[in-house]
Image (cartoon, coloured by chain):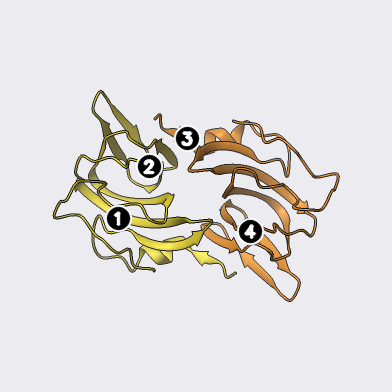
Chain colours: A orange, B yellow
């Protein structure tokens, strides 16, 4: 029940594609991550996933098209939909998703992390 | 699976304390609302509630203290905790909360709304 400054939390992140947990509520988590470059193709069989872009421009690739998500915009990726986030320049994003979601879905990659740290 | 511009959605809201649904995922909703003035004291017995402040400064009153939540900050109000949001100047906020949450908890007020419109 304390105010959390979102930019201050980003300022201590020095890596990419490694979401940290800002808050947990109703079985869901709010995470933040800095990303740059290409993530891996994956989906989440049971979980919808929301991306809110706080800085930069994210390219969200789907198998049949690509959606550009600018700063101040958000995109919902429904469960079961394959997606691949790509960022030409560094992007700061907030995620809202179920607590037990797997980072890269059923795909294992060098980017996969198994435990989300709190921040 | 389209990018949603959050400020554009705020720009068509002309009332106060009336959250609109921006997205629904995993039984939760993302809502946005403009607020100004005093809301009512209430709690949500079963639902945690997250407030993200996108513009202005929200004063979140609890029974034993008050927390100031500035632009770019967020605050989590756990289930069962009485709270009263107050905004001296207009505040734009985003809410994350379960789909079936009641606007003013168990309290009925002239501010209570029963159906959240999509935007």
C-alpha distance separating marks 1 and 3: 20 Å
C-alpha distance separating marks 4 and 2: 36 Å
Residue lying at 32% horizontally and 42% vertically, measured from the top left: B44
Q: Secondary structure at mark 1?
A: strand
- Mark 1 touches mark 4? (CB < 8 Å): no
Chain that bears disc 2: B
Residue lying at 27% horizontally and 34% vertically, measured from the top left: B82
Q: Same chain, marks 1 and 4?
A: no
Residue B96, numbered label: none
Residue A5, numbered label: 3
Q: Same chain, marks 1 and 3?
A: no
User: In the image, is B114 to the left or to the right of A59?
Assistant: left
Q: Find residue B115 and report its horizontal and vertical position in percent.
A: 29, 64
User: In the image, is A47 to the left or to the right of A17?
Assistant: left
- Mark 3 touches mark 4? (CB < 8 Å): no
Q: Secondary structure at mark 2?
A: loop
Chain that bears disc 3: A
Q: Same chain, marks 1 and 2?
A: yes
Residue A57, numbered label: 4
Mark 4 vs mark 2, foreground winner is: 2
- Mark 2 touches mark 3? (CB < 8 Å): no
Residue for badge 2: B46
Q: Quadrant of residue B49?
A: top left
| Image quadrant where one finds the N terminus of chain A | top left
Q: Same chain, marks 2 and 3?
A: no
Residue lying at 69% horizontally and 59% vertically, measured from the top left: A45
Q: Find residue B35 and report its horizontal and vertical position in percent.
A: 26, 52
**Sequence-earlier tag: 3 or 4:** 3
- Mark 4 touches mark 2? (CB < 8 Å): no
Residue B34, numbered label: 1
Residue neighbourhood size for the residue with mark 2, other residues' Cα within 10 Å, grouped as few (<14), some (14–19), many (≥20) = few
């Amino acid at each position: 029940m304390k105010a959390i400054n979102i930019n201050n939390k980003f300022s201590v992140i020095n890596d990419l594609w490694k979401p940290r947990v800002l808050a947990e509520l109703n079985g869901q988590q709010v995470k933040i991550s800095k990303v740059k470059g290409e993530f891996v193709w994956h989906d989440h069989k049971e979980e919808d996933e929301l991306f809110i872009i706080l800085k930069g421009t994210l390219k969200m690739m789907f198998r049949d098209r690509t959606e550009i998500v600018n700063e101040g915009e958000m995109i919902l990726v429904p469960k079961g939909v394959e997606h691949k986030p790509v960022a030409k320049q560094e992007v700061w994003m907030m995620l809202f998703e179920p607590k037990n979601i797997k980072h890269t879905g059923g795909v294992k990659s060098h980017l996969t992390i198994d435990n989300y740290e709190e921040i």
